[in-house]
Each structure stands twice: as C-alpha cells, then as structure tokens.
Amino acid sequence: MLKLWIVGASGQIGSAINEVLDPLEMEVFNTDKEELDITDTDEVLNFGVINRPDVIINCAAVTDTDFCEKEPELAYRVNALGARNLSIVARKTGAKMVQISTDDVFDGIRHTPYTEFDDTNPKTVYGRSKRAGENYVKEFTHKHFILRSNWVYGNGNNFVNRVLHAADTKDELLIASDQFGSPTSAKDLARIILYLIKTNEYGTYHATCQGVCNRYEFAQEVLKLAGKRITLRPVVTSESDLSSARPAYAVLDNFILRIINVYEMPDWRASLKEYMDERTED
Ligand SMILES: NC(=O)c1ccc[n+]([C@@H]2O[C@H](COP(=O)([O-])OP(=O)(O)OC[C@H]3O[C@@H](n4cnc5c(N)ncnc54)[C@H](OP(=O)(O)O)[C@@H]3O)[C@@H](O)[C@H]2O)c1
C-alpha cells in the first residue's frame, strides 16, 4: 500500500485529494496547521522520519495574495521555508515530493500562455515566496513533481463561491474582464496528482483545465450553471468587486503534459459543471 502524507489536508486541494483517492490503495496521513506547522523544522522532520511516507504532497501555503503583501515574513516562512522543511524530509526518507505551485511565478504581462520552459518573474510577495518554495524543492529533492495551477476552486474560499455569495446579497457585480486564466477544479488537480505520483515522470508541470476565459466570463458561467440572476458588469481590475493582486494574463500552457502525451486535463466548462452539480449550498 502506498503511504501518502497530505500536508495542508484541510485546504481546497488537500481535501479534494482525500475525496478522489482510493482508500483501499493508499494509507493516508493528513496534517494541517493545527496538527503540524510546516515552519517547525524539527517537528516536520520527526513526523516524516517516524511515519516514513512514500509520497509527501505539500498543499499547505499562505494563499491570500493581499495578505502576503502585508505579511511577507509569514509568506516566506510558510511558502518557501515550509516547502524546504518538507523537502529535507523527502530527501532523508527517499519519499517522492509533490509541491503545488502557481501561475503567480510569472509576471503575467504577456499575451501568450506560459510554458514550463519560460523564465519566471514573479511580481508579488506570494509569487516570489512560491518560486522560492519551488527552488527549495528542486535543490533538496530529486524525485519531485512541481505542479503549477491556476484559478483553483474547491471546498473553500474561492472565486466561484464569492460570486455565488454576491449573487445572494447584491444586485450588481463588477467583474474584471482584463484578467485571463483557466479555471481549474481542485478535484481535477487532485486527479492528476494521484496519477503522476505513480509514475517516475519527475519535474515541473503546468496543470490547468483546458481553455481560457476572463474573470467576467468565468462569473457568467458560474451564474448560468447555478441558475442565479444578477447584473454583471465587465470592468478593469482596479474597479472590480472581487479583485486582488494577481497577474493579468495568468494563462499556463500544459506544454509538457501535451508533448509527453501522458495525461489530458478536461475542459474548464465541463470541470466547472461537475463542481456545480456536486456543490451543496453553504
Ligand atoms: N487556490 C488557487 O487558485 C491556487 C492556484 C494555484 C496554486 N495553488 C497552490 O495550491 C496549494 C493549495 O492551495 P489551496 O487553494 O488548497 O489553499 P487553501 O485552501 O488556502 O489551503 C492551504 C492550507 O494550508 C494550511 N496552512 C497554512 N499555513 C500552514 C502552516 N504553517 N503549516 C501547515 N499548514 C498550513 C492552511 O491552514 P489555515 O487555513 O488554517 O491557514 C490551509 O488549510 C497552495 O500551495 C497554493 O499556493 C492554489
């Protein structure tokens, strides 16, 4: 039986992995901040050495980009040094290491999708701390999968749930039409993680659902699938209701997945439909 350690297990992606995995096939250790703070180097090392997982999946992070700008030390401590601590354990125990990363490692000023071979150039504290986390993983482990994703929604605070909440509380919503990305369900990200960990295809991957839209189109699709009505107005990011410090063009090309032809991510609209069909009201 494969032993998995899911770190940040209560978050959107951590809980989606738990939902998707087959418990008959895997033994799972779930930890989150309450049980084990990944910034505590000795505790992390002890846990790893005692439990000896085959795979460590790091879903823990400070993900609020605006909060990271205000608290850069915390952002680096968790997103960079936390990833370092887990990588040290992975190296010591021979475990495979999965690090979830983000389009925010790019500057987002281009108008064509970024591949894994493009140079990173993060513009925010969140993006810089996540890039530092990637670098630690590369430095300390050989058997790693770094998956960069984009506009992830699952069980938690995300754009889909904020739009749905606004639809119940407001008459009109101003949404950025100048931010582009590929909405990706946490469940679809979980599925590719569980696929990759059984392979030896190590390295950095872009893993987003197929297709591109702007935030306004994303919100339109959410409301359509939910059967909710509200006036939506396309505006620039600075005037929008649900904006934060994000790259304008957050589009990742799943280039390596395509050229090695091992796994195809679903279309973002189909993925969103699955999420909305399964979603229960808060
Ligand atoms: N969401 C997206 O759009 C997106 C896109 C691309 C990549 N990612 C990456 O995917 C990963 C998971 O994202 P997510 O959306 O699942 O985030 P999430 O829902 O915010 O989950 C992150 C989890 O990490 C925990 N955590 C924070 N600090 C910790 C610490 N010091 N020690 C242990 N656990 C800690 C959080 O606990 P608390 O809630 O108690 O703080 C939370 O349960 C992150 O690495 C993120 O950078 C996310």
Image: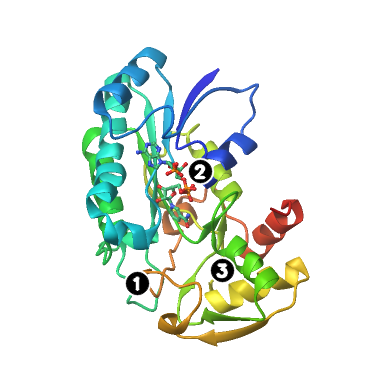
- Select label 2 or label 3 by which is in front: 2
Gap in Å between the C-alphas at discs 2 and 3?
25 Å
- Left or right of 132 in this view: 100: right
Looking at the rendered structure, the secondary structure element under dot 2 is loop
**Residue bearing the label numbered 1:** 108
Q: Quadrant of residue 8?
A: top left
Q: The residue tagged with tag 1: helix, strand or loop?
A: loop
Q: Which mark is residue 169?
A: none
- The extreme right residue here reads 227
Compared to residue 282, the image places residue 113 above or below, namely below
Residue 11 numbered mark, or none: 2
Of mark 2 and mark 3, the one earlier in the sequence is: 2
The correct choice, above or below, for 240 with respect to 12 in the image is: below
Mark 3, Cα crowd under 10 Å, few <14 / some 14-19 / many 20+, is: some
- Contact, CB < 8 Å: mark 1 with mark 3? no
**Would residue 279 be found to the left or right of residue 193 on screen?**
right
Residue that sits furthest to the front in the current view: 169
Q: Amino acid at mark 1?
A: Gly
Report whether the residue tagged 2 is closer than 8 Å to ligand 1. Answer: yes
Q: Residue at x 54, y 37 (%)?
A: 194
Disc 3 is placed on an element classified as loop
In front: mark 2 or mark 1?
Answer: 2
Q: Position of residue 173 (x, y in %)?
A: 59, 80
Residue 234: name its quadrant.
bottom right
Residue 24 coordinates in the image, percent (x, y):
65, 21
Q: CA distance from mark 1 to mark 3?
A: 17 Å
Nearest the camera: 267 or 159? 159
As rendered, which of 206 and 218 lies closer to the eye?
218
Residue 161 versus residue 10 in the image, above or below? below
Per the image, the residue denoted by label 3 is 211
